[in-house]
């Protein structure tokens, strides 16, 4: 028990939990927090906007699976970060927001205090399920321990700790309250046995895997080979297994032909996936009568599917147990027949992906050549743009261990660059390429300056179609006159150079591949600008 300020209690608790870096912007109400973070040797990465801080923390957490921390000041700063927290919540990413709040004695109806939000914690609870508002300096460490215990148990999700600003510099006694490591749930043997019985004779099984199956890569592949089952991945599941595996149909949830790919399946095994419309676009998702689902979240288990065989457990252990039971119940002839069917589906998926991704064929080809020659993991931090979901998601051949960071749930714009910065800071050996559209890039383009200052070697590819191309297409398909979607963008390479980054424009696969390799020789960030040759790009204004 020691007497420390609330800010010091916080920094001490974070340090004890192994937090070595935070993303955030100092403000009038959090100066003691930043002073104590520095005094405790915690590195501070300064973004240019709190939304950027949230995406940086998300990229780092998504890549490592570890809790990453954002520190903001009160009011507008919290609301700026809230969009990023929504993205982390919908994609189950462990980001912790720490922020000051109104004083303990603040009038309930407000009095015009700087950055005033009458009930900031309520705003946070509208997005997050875990929000802790402390009531004394000594409670700060307890809040850290309890919150991290909750965040690291089962399904990971973001959380927030609010410190009333009158407690941050107030002194009070406090003890460290280390978080508690909780074991992941293990499968009920009877549930595994009945699930194995249900799929043992299946002639056309499919596996749908989400990011929650990331720890289960080898077991997932073993399950597919045991059954002869094709594997469909969610966007954030790319890299769990090698995309070139014969039974991998890829991350094809955005394709109009997805129902045709699922057609004929007599069993689906869903592992660590929400089966959400944001991942699998054609609705409703057609599933067969037999649905085995492995998930760590009992609520999610009942969502988006009628599950005949639920297995509430950690993906890796449950998948391994399912394989062990199936080995003795599955005939080689049945597996071969299923694999033949899966190969036909893979051929159909490949053809459909090539057709949908044709405007971005050069981009995907350059990425594939770059990835094939890389001697370390490649991380693609994607934005919600056609080049990513129609192009790279289906056209980039990721290896096992590569990553595709995609803002699936909230579908936010401006995610790619700051998420790539966070990913690179968290995994220094990886090659990190952020990909954004010209419209979405302007949401967070200022974070190039943050990357320059921190000397982060990240490559940003801006795919330019002259505005909000997807929305322009949707307007045209409705018969509307497109409005507000054709943008007069900046000279992106010049803008990058103005912020201290390297900036180039290239055309074609060969030039793009060369630029990607040249970016590896640059100590800081590189912006590569390319022009999209697509239906949407036909409306581009002269530049």
Image (cartoon, rainbow, N blue to C red):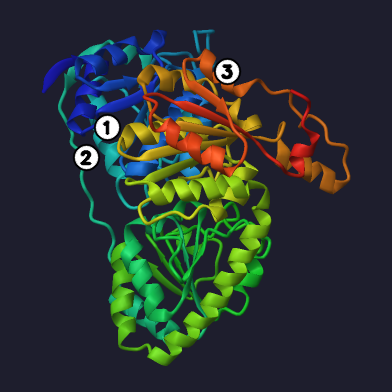
Local packing at callout 1 (Cα closer than 10 Å; few below 14, some 14-19, many 20+) is many
When the figure is inspected, residue 347 is found, relative to residue 463, above or below; the finding is below
Q: Considering the image in quadrants, where does the C terminus appear?
A: top right
Residue wearing tag 2:
179
Relative image position of residue 413 (x, y in whole percent) = 59, 34
Q: Quadrant of residue 174?
A: top left
Residue at mark 3: 495
Tell me if label 3 and label 1 are in contact, CB under 8 Å: no
Mark 2 in CB contact with mark 3 (< 8 angstroms): no
Q: Earlier in the sequence, mark 2 or mark 3?
A: 2
**In this picture, is 501 found above or below 391?**
above
* Up-down relation of residue 346 to residue 463 (above or below): below
Find residue 144 and name its label: 1
The residue depicted at 44 percent of the width and 31 percent of the height is 519
Question: Would you call the spot at circle 3 few (<14 residues within 10 Å), some (14-19), or many (20 or more)?
Answer: some
Disc 1, disc 2: CB below 8 Å? yes
| SS for dot 3 | helix
């Amino acid at each position: 028990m020691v007497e420390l300020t609330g800010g010091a209690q916080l920094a001490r608790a974070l340090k004890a939990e192994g937090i070595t870096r935070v993303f955030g912007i100092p403000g009038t109400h959090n100066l003691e927090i930043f002073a104590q973070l520095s005094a405790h040797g915690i590195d501070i990465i300064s973004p240019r906007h709190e939304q950027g801080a949230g995406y940086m923390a998300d990229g780092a957490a998504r890549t490592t699976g570890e809790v990453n921390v954002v520190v903001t000041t009160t009011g507008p700063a919290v609301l700026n970060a809230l969009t990023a927290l929504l993205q982390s919540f919908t994609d189950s990413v462990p980001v912790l927001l720490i922020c000051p709040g109104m004083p303990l004695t603040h009038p309930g109806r407000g009095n015009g205090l700087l950055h005033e939000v009458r009930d900031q914690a309520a705003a946070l609870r509208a997005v997050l399920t875990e929000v802790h508002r402390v009531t004394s300096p000594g409670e700060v460490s307890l809040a850290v321990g309890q919150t991290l215990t909750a965040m690291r148990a089962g399904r990971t999700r973001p959380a927030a700790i609010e410190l009333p600003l009158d407690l941050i510099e107030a002194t009070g006694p406090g003890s460290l309250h280390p978080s508690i490591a909780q074991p992941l749930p293990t499968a009920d043997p009877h549930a595994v046995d009945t699930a194995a019985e249900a799929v043992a004779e299946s002639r056309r099984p499919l596996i749908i895997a989400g990011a929650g199956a990331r720890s289960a890569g080898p077991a997932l592949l073993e399950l597919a080979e045991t059954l002869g089952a094709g594997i469909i991945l969610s966007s954030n599941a790319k890299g769990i297994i090698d995309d070139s595996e014969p039974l991998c149909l890829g991350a094809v949830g955005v394709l109009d032909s997805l129902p045709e790919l699922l057609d004929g399946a007599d069993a689906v095994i869903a592992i660590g996936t929400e089966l959400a419309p944001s991942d699998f676009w054609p609705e409703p998702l057609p599933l067969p009568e037999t649905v085995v689902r492995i998930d760590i979240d009992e609520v999610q288990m009942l969502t988006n599917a009628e599950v005949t065989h639920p297995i509430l457990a950690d993906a890796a252990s449950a998948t391994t147990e399912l394989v062990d039971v199936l080995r003795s119940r599955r005939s080689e002839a049945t597996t071969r027949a299923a694999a033949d069917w899966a190969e036909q589906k893979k051929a159909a998926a490949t053809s459909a992906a090539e057709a949908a991704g044709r405007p971005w064929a050069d981009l995907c080809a350059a990425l594939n050549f770059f990835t094939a020659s890389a001697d370390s993991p490649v991380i693609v931090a994607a934005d919600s743009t056609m080049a990513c979901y129609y192009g790279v998601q289906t056209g980039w051949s990721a290896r096992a261990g590569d990553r595709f960071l995609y803002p699936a749930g909230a579908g936010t714009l401006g995610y790619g660059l700051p998420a790539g910065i966070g990913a690179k800071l968290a995994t220094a050996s990886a090659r990190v390429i952020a990909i954004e559209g010209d419209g979405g890039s302007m949401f967070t383009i200022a974070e190039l300056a943050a990357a320059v200052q921190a000397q982060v070697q990240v490559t940003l590819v801006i795919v330019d179609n002259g505005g909000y191309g997807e929305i322009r297409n949707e307007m045209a398909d409705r018969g509307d006159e497109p409005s507000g979607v054709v943008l007069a963008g900046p000279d992106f390479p010049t803008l990058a150079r103005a912020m201290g980054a390297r900036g180039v424009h290239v055309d074609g696969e060969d030039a793009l591949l060369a630029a990607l390799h040249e970016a590896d020789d640059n100590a800081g960030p590189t912006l590569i600008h390319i022009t999209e040759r697509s239906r949407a790009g036909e409306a581009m204004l002269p530049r």
